[in-house]
Amino acid sequence: MARSAGVVIQMLQDILVTGLVNGGVYALLAIGFSLVFGVARIVNIAHTAFYMLAAYCFYTLLVTAKLNVLLAALIAIAAVTALAALCYRLVIEPVRSHESAVLIATIALGLIFQELMLVAFGGNFLGIPSAIDGVASVLGVSIPYQRLLILVVAAAALAATWFVLYRTRLGLAIRATANDLEVANLMGMNVNRVAMVAVALSVALAAVAGVVVAPVFVVDPLMWLAPLVTMLAIVVLGGLGSLKGSLIGALIIGYVEAITVFALPQGAFLKGAVALSIMVVVLLVRPEGLFGVAFEEER
Amino acid sequence: MVRSFLLAAALAAAAPLAQAQGTVKIAILGPMAFVQGENHWAGAEMARDEINKGGGIQVGGRKLQVELARIDTNEIQSVPDATNAMERAIARDKADFLVGGFRSEAVLAMQEIAMDNKKLFLGAGAAHSKLGINVEANYERYKYWFRVTPVKDVDLVRQSFAALGEVAAQIRKQLGKESPKVAILAEKAVWVEGIVAAAQKNLPAMKMEVVGLWQPSAVATDVTAELAAIDRSGADIVFTLLSGPVGIVVGRQMGERNMKAIAFGINVEAQKDGFWQATASKGNYVSTLETIAEVEITPKTVPFVKAFKERFKKSPTYNAGTYDAIMLLREAIEKAGTTDADKLVPVLEKTVFTGITGVVEFDKRHDPVWGPGKVTGLAVQWQDGEKVTFWPPQVKGARPFRMPAAK
């Protein structure tokens, strides 16, 4: 009896820590995606492709060019963010008024990036050494330091995003545009530039995610597809455009996946399906998601 | 005008020469952007150069040079791409023979096209039994298919149990555990179902205790939850059945967690040279079945592996078995004195060919016969960045298996 209680407690500890780490990575991706949708109504399907590009860029700078970890990470994030701003100007802005065209253009962008990486690096799976080696014991659960680093970086990036949005003039402009695009435009704001900044900010978050998770995942040209589905599930669950919703949605999905694997070992492959099922249930009960704006109220 | 005339005359003079020399065109089919296709092509290049350097294939009074066509099937990403590539190889490239293939679903579809066109298709990648069952069920249609490498899936299971017995014996001896605990970690895919059922049934009879089954997705990027649960189960062996990139993740994360359990089974990614880099040097002790390594399986193996490494700066994977396929084809053509597929089939059926992965002799399904003295395969373990062969122990060049707990 005491032994089974001990096993349950150990499992709860495992779930608590693993779910938090998984949720942190998802939050980095989902908040960026949600931000750009909230501000500019852009559904950027290439969002996780930028995450993949950042991982490749980091790999090239760290493993091939043998740069310092911090320098490689900063250059990778900056380069991918600049590329995103360029893509916005050349590909998204010209078709921005047509939502379906934006959707198709960003799908095309994602596939182009995938094929370019396939040509440049082949279909090989690449590994990146951890920034910090070793394992920490948190609540009796063994967690490699790199995973804790992911959590710390995710928290710092999310705090920085909150600071930019709520404590700076740029953030005020972004929130004003998100609140009412037309009024912001009439008030003299350059809404296109604000949208571009929002795209750059959101892709920077994706790039941070790519750089910090690359050492624990495997880098390959298709690595953007699985998180794309999970990220879409999270933002729909949390409510499209809601940053708070994305954060909570990310934690919910992170925990649901952890619970599925620990409670149902033979069904570990179902973790994605369980997460998507929860999204469907939430949509049936509350179509706007947990914290989203009801569709009829949308501009 | 004079220049055109001279050019035409030169071409006319050269034409009969080319005709007299003649070529055999072999299409090498594989996912060329991936390691599997790279090895298909590299093995074929080795065979082509060796044959052509020796003057070519002797057919009657003529010597035919080998010409290769590189056909990218992209089969890892798309089965329709593979069938289109096969059509192209036959219709546009006018290939005389077809060699390669990797993903069973794609090869099954490609097999149909090759059989429609009565072209000899020598497999060098897919393990699914159905490919051979087709030959037995409808010989007249499927007789042009021969699997050169690897052995069929059922034989892979036999191979993995035989090597697993060796690992368990070492655990009993070194750790004094009479009944080693085994956690089965199998990706969710059709090919693992039979093996999982067989493992659950047979391992207790082999004095091993199965503590659970974990099934992540083949493309999972994180298995910390699975490994934490396996750690808690007290498993001594993690019996892996992994063909996708999850194999790298398992190796790396087991290393990061300093797990005492040993990973053994089928881990396709661990067969590749890139595994050590992909796991960021964390994949120590990961073990897997293998087909070729620098050990003396036959007298041809070590020279081939050395020459391959020298030329391509990496070790061959089993897909480089295209080398054996082309060499086997040469032997059959020279015996039959023709390149006619219908006449080559009975010759191939009777041929006993010593290749780089064993002695290939085909059964009635045109599968290579598995067993000692034929093709048995190998088991290898990553030890400090080196892939070391430990099974079969009697093979010259094999070294002992190492366990993390004994480090």
Image: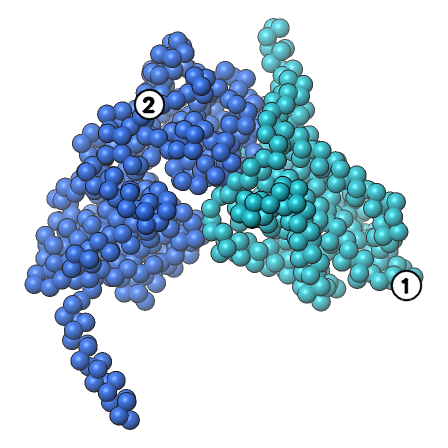
Q: Position of residue B119 (x, y in %)?
A: 24, 57
The quadrant where residue B273 appears: top left
Position of B164 relative to A239 (above/below): above
Compare residues A166 and B205 and report the one nearer the observer.
A166
Q: Position of residue A130 (x, y in %)?
A: 58, 35
Q: Which residue is mark 1?
A: A188
Mark 2: amino acid: Pro
Mark 1: amino acid: Gly
Crowding near pointer 1: few (<14 within 10 Å), some, many (20+)?
few
Chain of the residue under label 2: B
Q: Tell me the CA gap for discs 2 and 1.
A: 75 Å
Q: How many circles with numbers are drawn on the protein?
A: 2
The blue chain is: B
Residue for point 73% across, 54% down: A199
Q: Is residue B301 visible?
A: yes
Left or right, B335 with reference to B249:
left
